[in-house]
Image (spheres, coloured by chain):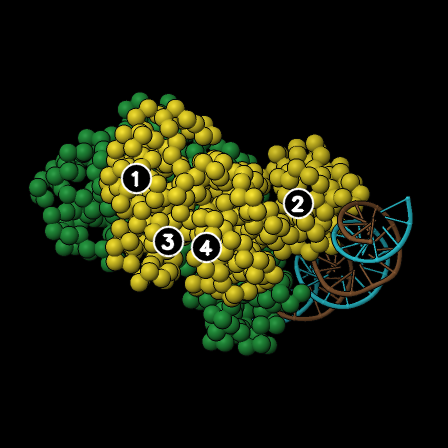
Chain colours: A yellow, B green, C cyan, D brown
Amino acid sequence: MDKKNKKKELLILQVLKESDKPLTSARIAERLGLTGYDISERTIRLYLQKMEADGLVSSNGKRGSIITERGLEELDSSWVIDKVGFLSAKIDRMSYMMNFDINSTSGTVVINMTLVEPKIFAENIKYIEKVYYDGYAMGNLLTFLAPGESLNHIIVPEGMIGVGTVCSITLNGVLLKHGIPTTSRFGGLLEIKEKKPVRFVEIIMYDGTSIDPLEVFIRSGMTNYMGAIKTGSGRIGASFREFPAESRDKVEQLAERLKRIGLGGLVGVGMPGQSFLDIPVSEGRVGAIVIGGLNPVSILEENGVRAYSRALAGLIDFNRLFHFREMESRIKQFL
Amino acid sequence: MDKKNKKKELLILQVLKESDKPLTSARIAERLGLTGYDISERTIRLYLQKMEADGLVSSNGKRGSIITERGLEELDSSWVIDKVGFLSAKIDRMSYMMNFDINSTSGTVVINMTLVEPKIFAENIKYIEKVYYDGYAMGNLLTFLAPGESLNHIIVPEGMIGVGTVCSITLNGVLLKHGIPTTSRFGGLLEIKEKKPVRFVEIIMYDGTSIDPLEVFIRSGMTNYMGAIKTGSGRIGASFREFPAESRDKVEQLAERLKRIGLGGLVGVGMPGQSFLDIPVSEGRVGAIVIGGLNPVSILEENGVRAYSRALAGLIDFNRLFHFREMESRIKQFL
DNA sequence: ATCATTAATGGCAATATTGCCATTTTTTTA
DNA sequence: TAAAAAAATGGCAATATTGCCATTAATGAT
């Protein structure tokens, strides 16, 4: 029994470690549920008691428990895979950090960045516009970063510009601000036929990778946007998310509002507990497909340009973004 | 309770479905354990009884149980993520299918295939030899497939050859024949300094991806073999495996024997329950790092050649393989 | 500041899971 | 082919987990 016991203790410690504030049993159960471990609230309380007696956690009355130094040591000396470094963790962190407010349409949003020579970018603008136009992009906004500007360790080198496209994680962030916890499950290559999503042909789970799946698909030349924008059939990057079934309506409303301000990217939402595009969803949850934020610039790679793209590159203020129609005129200042 | 109950039933059904022969409770518990679900033998027997009463499985006395038609339907109508399509499943299937025998050094082994023009291949032979020579390849054997030959749906087109390199899954297969069940955990980019492995810089779990991680790293140009073979520092593809701690000695023996016949690829084995190169391992298991089979040909991609590589391409007879020193002379017939 | 509402806790009993083991069946060995 | 060894099963009792709920603390509204 000891062994399995230990495992659950470590899972709880892990959750507590990742949170800065105290968590109650209900909260812990919820998070564990999201990660695929079903443990009842009650059981968690039992564990918390035992662990408090052992000095691994410290209870804060009814405000929840936090992990102690001893607890952290215990965690270090053990073998729970440290999900830090995995995409799922980065996603959680980023959506927590951004602070875009949908009412005032201000604040920061998460963007991806692509470094490319302005001249080459200018040559491909026609295609990129088409990607936005056909709705294969996250909304219709983007930004340019001038040479010398930096974002989160990445500095735009001389002779290049940074193209910042809105990351689809922005949606998670907005939902989170409205109390809806989103789980990003996987990024994949979505096959499009007659402008409609058919199925995912390749998949990489966010909790099993340290590099962004969409970056991967783009870099290895597996996407086919040229087809998507020309004939309506191709393969584009997309991401699968899940949220609680109760919030389905609210999600759709928020998505609609986001769309109006140029941040739309929701391809579709499934029905509670039902599989969506053959992707099964846990009970009490609904699935949704979100367009990949890097889509517009992946056209570059497809046309043989080795552009350096980085998903989840950092946060940027919403009012720095402009409509894709302005690309043509704005790029001139860098030529 | 009903809900969780259901989940376990489905897990058991899933295991039974994947097996062609009847499985006993111990066998089922073992397999589930490997996939990360710890359920005791006894509990599984309890479930099997209930499920037999419901007509989902049919017991074969003490030889184990098999899934019935009803059981298959139940599984179809439910939402267990179908791991078919994921790499972990493919790996299991392949290592089960190959039948190389270490004593008679005969039988089939799993290979990866790369399609490339003979001329271009010939130009890069020097580098490829060095990869083998420095021990960054799986053993020192490979094979060529002539135009028109096919392997598992892939046909070598005219004007090209298929380069078959030994896949590291071959190791799993050999161990399996000797009763050692191996779990392939992830593929990653292994950083090499002064010819020694330092740490994994990127990771993709096999049970969370539908495309081979090493293929991904190679295609997106993240490897650095040129560095590895020239200065001793670089990034190469490698894979992390786990097996039961009891079999540690036997594994090392077998690996040694494989090495002697040209199929070596084991970089190192950890100690029981201890983390190895900062990768934590479950209790009662040991971790091991295995060289990526596609390594030799990834030099091509690094040198700007867009070669089409496919990991786990298929099975081929061991006696079709030749030593890498023969590349030079053997390639001539295709030029 | 007070009261109503909401959320969290721990006790208790009902279930579920597991360890242990005697018994039976299968497999291996002599 | 018979005997010995190994593996599998199901009964029973010990633990572990969970559902339910009365009690109590925190939060929000007036």
- Disc 3 target residue: A135
- Disc 4 target residue: A266
Alpha-carbon span between mark 2 and mark 1: 52 Å
Q: Position of residue B302 (x, y in %)?
A: 26, 34
Alpha-carbon span between mark 2 and mark 3: 42 Å
Q: Chain of mark 4?
A: A
Q: Position of residue B153 (x, y in %)?
A: 24, 58
Q: Chain of mark 3?
A: A
Q: Earlier in the sequence, mark 2 or mark 3?
A: 2
Residue at position x 73%, y 42% from top? A65
Same chain shared by disc 1 and disc 4: yes
Contact, mark 1 vs mark 4 (Cβ under 8 Å) = no
Same chain shared by disc 2 and disc 4: yes
Quadrant in which the N terminus of chain B appears: bottom right
- Disc 1 target residue: A328
Q: Is residue A19 left or right of residue A154?
A: right
Question: Which numbered mark, 2 or 3, is in the foreground of this view?
Answer: 3
Residue B67 in view of the camera = no
Position of D1 relative to B279 (above/below): below
Q: Amino acid at mark 4?
A: Leu
- Secondary structure type for disc 2: helix
Q: Earlier in the sequence, mark 2 or mark 1?
A: 2
Pick the front one: B93 or A180? A180
Q: Amino acid at mark 2?
A: Ile
- Disc 2 target residue: A12
Q: Earlier in the sequence, mark 2 or mark 4?
A: 2
- Secondary structure type for disc 3: loop
Same chain shared by disc 1 and disc 3: yes
Q: Amino acid at mark 1?
A: Glu
Quadrant in which the C terminus of chain B appears: top left
Same chain shared by disc 2 and disc 3: yes
